Image (spheres, helix red, strand yellow):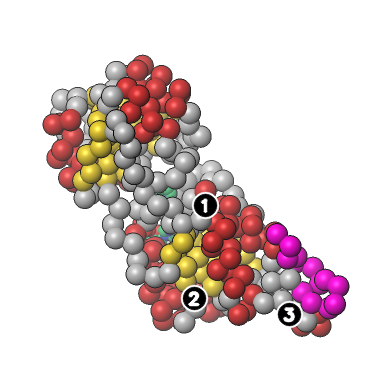
Amino acid sequence: MTTSGRIRAGGRAGPRLRVLILGGTAQARQLAAEATAVTDAPPAGRVVTSLAGRVARPRLPAGETRVGGFGGPDGLARWLRDEQISAVVDATHPFATRIAASAVAACTETGIPLLVLRRPGWVAGPGDDWHRVLDLGAAAAALPVLGRRAMLTTGRQSLPAFAPLDGIFFLIRTVDPPQPPLPADRVLLLDRGPYTVEGEVALMRRHDIDVLVTKDSGGEETAAKLTAANRLGLPVLMVDRAPAPDTATVATVDAALAWLLALPQSAGASGDQTG
Ligand code: NAP
C-alpha cells in the first residue's frame, strides 16, 4: 500500500477514513488492521470496530473498539451521527442477520454509504455428502435421518433447537460456555480454533462421529471440519444463509479497503486541513 496517514511531500495528507466496521469476524479484524494502517491518524481519521459483546475474551482489532448493541436501527443511526462516521462496513458473520438489517436501515436513514463484506458460502466438491437445510429447525428435523452421533458446530445460540432430540449423542463445540437448554447426551468442547484437518479427523474418530452439523459460514478458518468429514465419508448437515441484504457487497478485505479509499471523503486533503 503506497498511501500513508502522514502528510506527504507536496503538502498532501493520506486518506482520511471515518469508518465504523461492524465486526466479530476474522475479516473484520483484517479490515481494521489495513484501514488503520493507511488512514490519517485520529482525530481526523477514525477506524472504529463494533463488537456485540457476546464473547468473553474477544480478539481485539486494530484501531478503536466499542462493545455492545446500539439499541436497534435508530440507536445505530444516532451513534453514526454523533461520532461523525462517514462510511459503514458490515463485516459481521453471515448469520448475524439482525445487525445486518439494522445497518441497512440506519445507513438509509442517515445517507451514510454502507458496504457489506461477506465471504462466499462453501461449495460442495467431489466426494462431499452435504444436505442443505433452510434453518436450524429444519436441521434438527433432518438430523435423526442422517446419524446418531453428531458433531455440532452451529454456535452457542443454536443449541435450543437441538435440545429436544433424544437418542442422539452431541459433540458440541463453542467458543464460550452455552446456556441451557442443551441436548441431554453431550460432550462440550470449548475451542475457537484455528483447526487442522488432521485435528478434526482425530476429534471425529475419538467421538465416533457419524454426522457433522454446521452453518454455511464460509471462509478458510473453519473449513477443516468439512475436509475431515469428506475424508471420513460422513454426511454434513449444512444450514443455509438467509438472503444477503440488498446492498453493495464484496467478498474480500482488499475489495472493502478499495471501496473505502474510493469514497469522496477518503481523498487526501491538503496539509493545512488535516487537523
Ligand atoms: P444478530 O442476531 O444479528 O444481532 C443481535 C443484536 O446484537 C443486534 O440487534 C445488535 O443489537 C447486537 N449486535 C450484533 N452484532 C453487533 C456488532 N458487531 N456491534 C454491535 N452490536 C451488535 O447477531 P448475532 O448472531 O447475535 O451475532 C453477534 C455478533 O457475533 C456479530 O457481530 C457477529 O459478527 C458475531 N458472530 C456471529 C456468529 C453467528 O453465527 N451468528 C458467528 C461468529 C461471530 P442492537 O440492535 O441493540 O444494536
Kind of residue sitting beneath label 2 = Pro
From the viewer's perspective, is residue 152 above or below residue 7?
above
The quarter holding residue 109 reads: bottom left
> Does 140 lie within the magenta span?
no
Q: CA distance from mark 1 to mark 2?
A: 19 Å
**Whole-Å distance between the Cαs marked 1 and 3?**
28 Å
| Disc 2: which residue | 113
Q: Which residue is at the front of the view, 265 or 189?
A: 265
Quadrant holding the N terminus: bottom right
For the point 73% across and 65% down, which residue is it?
A: 3
Question: What's the magenta region?
Answer: 1-13
Tell me the element at label 2: loop
Q: x and y percent of residue 70 in the render?
A: 45, 67
**In the figure, 203 relative to 273: above or below?**
above
Tag 1 secondary structure:
helix
Q: Quadrant of ligand 1?
A: bottom left
Magenta stretch encompasses residue 5: yes
Q: Earlier in the sequence, mark 2 or mark 3?
A: 2
Q: Residues within 10 Å of mark 1 (few under 14, many from 20)?
A: many
The residue where tag 3 is placed is 269
Q: Position of residue 231 (x, y in %)?
A: 35, 24
- In terms of depth relative to the viewer, which is nearer, 27 or 45? 27
Give percent across and percent down for residue 228. Answer: 38, 27
Residue type highlighted by circle 1: Gln
Quarter holding residue 199: top left
Q: Is residue 122 visible?
A: yes
Relative image position of residue 122 (x, y in whole percent): 36, 45
Type of the residue with mark 3: Ala
Q: In whole angstroms, how far apart are the C-alphas of marks 2 and 3? A: 20 Å
Q: Looking at the figure, which quarter contains the C terminus?
A: bottom right
- Residue wearing tag 1: 27
